[in-house]
Image (cartoon, rainbow, N blue to C red):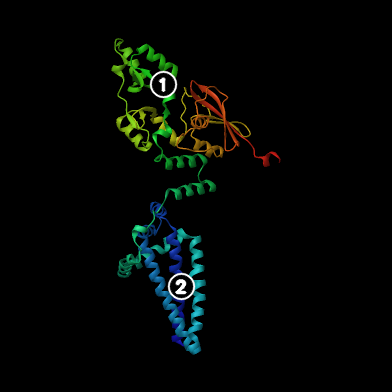
Amino acid sequence: MIQDAIEILLFVICILLSAFFASSEVALISITRAKARTLVNEGKPGSNAVASLKESPEHLLITILIGNTIVNIAAASIATAIAIQIFGDLGVGIATGFVVIILLIFGEIGPKIYAARASDSFALTVAPVILFLSRIFTPLIWLVERVSPKFGIGKESAEPAVTEEEIKEWIDVGKEDGTIEQGEQDMLYSVLEFADTTAREIMTPRVDVILMEDTVTFEEAIRIFNETGFSRIPVYHDQNDNITGILNVKDVFSAMVSRRKDSTIKEIMYDPMFVPETKKIDDLLKELQVHRVQMAIVIDEYSSFVGIVTVEDILEELVGDILDEYDKEEPEILNISEGVYVVDAQMWVDDINDRIDINLPVDEAYETVGGLIIDRLGHIPLHPGEKTEINEGKITLVVMQMHGRRIVKVKIVIHPSQGEENR
């Protein structure tokens, strides 16, 4: 009688241990390394054990599997012994069915559901025990790690712990839950995309750059600075492609105050910094900081001048437009009526598609909506009003404003489908 009671007690203990290992697996696996570090920084009891286990997830998983396997086999063996004593040879089948049901309900499903609902607190509780067992099972873990590569299970196949897409998903979840504001979401997305942005994507194109010839006088230079509102202007020699320096308005005033009126701007301008249009802006920002300059001259693969990038342009990729007293706030996209938009001709087609939710064609021959019009017309527009049809007449692009041969504004007209017109 006492022996039967001991066997039943041992069986119950095995079920409880099975529940412990099953719930520990869910709680500890669900916690990320980043979360573990957060718990450590908060000084939560057991957080150091959690962090140690997350440093080696293979050891954690192997420890839990070894412990769970041992107690499950022990539970099955004890239940079989008890059942044989009671039912004889039929006890094996009865014990098997009984143990499967008990382990499934009380050793797997129930504990895992509980652990999933309180993963953080439960993980902090069980982590010290699992860490202690991982040290006891060290010889077995070593053996498994030596055997596992034979079955193609190697560290090379492991995926990154956190991917950029996962971070974006967490940002979206935070926005939906209200813990992250819209502005914070935009900035976080900008940070993630920052390293993938090139100088060409944010530069002021050559046609929009104010230039100054190296033969102008100080008085003429001051007039240009005053008219444009800029504090730095690229300087060229003979032709626009030949950029030879950058002139700072402070240097001009300093020279005039010092009565160096016989000097020329060649003597006070500083050497330009040239960068390829494919340069990533995070690297460019570091170079600008190292050289202590505010502007870089962007060149293409043929070393031709194609635009300029300033520190302000780079920072605006993170925090949005930075306006000063000389800037005129004009929206890149203006919705003037239903299905009718006026956009800046220099906007990239991809950006317009994203912001208006349309499907303008993308091609390597152009990048901007102005380039798309020129590509479809087959020539540079001669006057405002020229238009082209896109997507089988569903969208019309109209040249609204031109400056010389350059398209400034484009009107996008989205025609409703026949089904929508009949509603």
Q: Position of residue 373 (x, y in %)?
A: 52, 30
- The disc labelled 1 sits on which kind of residue? Ile
- Badges 2 and 1: C-beta atoms under 8 Å apart? no
Which numbered disc covers residue 210? 1
**What residue is shown at x 48% (from left), y 34% (from top)?**
348
- Using the numbered discs, state the Cα–Cα distance from disc 2 to disc 1 in whole angstroms: 77 Å
- Using the image, determine if residue 339 lies above or below residue 26: above
**What residue is shown at x 52% (from left), y 75% (from top)?**
101
Q: Is residue 269 visible?
A: yes
Q: Nearer the viewer, residue 98 or 375?
A: 375
Residue lying at the far front in this picture: please name it: 378
Which numbered disc covers residue 153? none
Q: Nearer the viewer, residue 2 or 95?
A: 95
Q: Nearer the viewer, residue 270 or 124?
A: 270
Q: Position of residue 64 (x, y in %)?
A: 40, 67
Secondary-structure class at tag 1: loop
Query: Relative to 68, is 174 on the left or the right?
Result: right
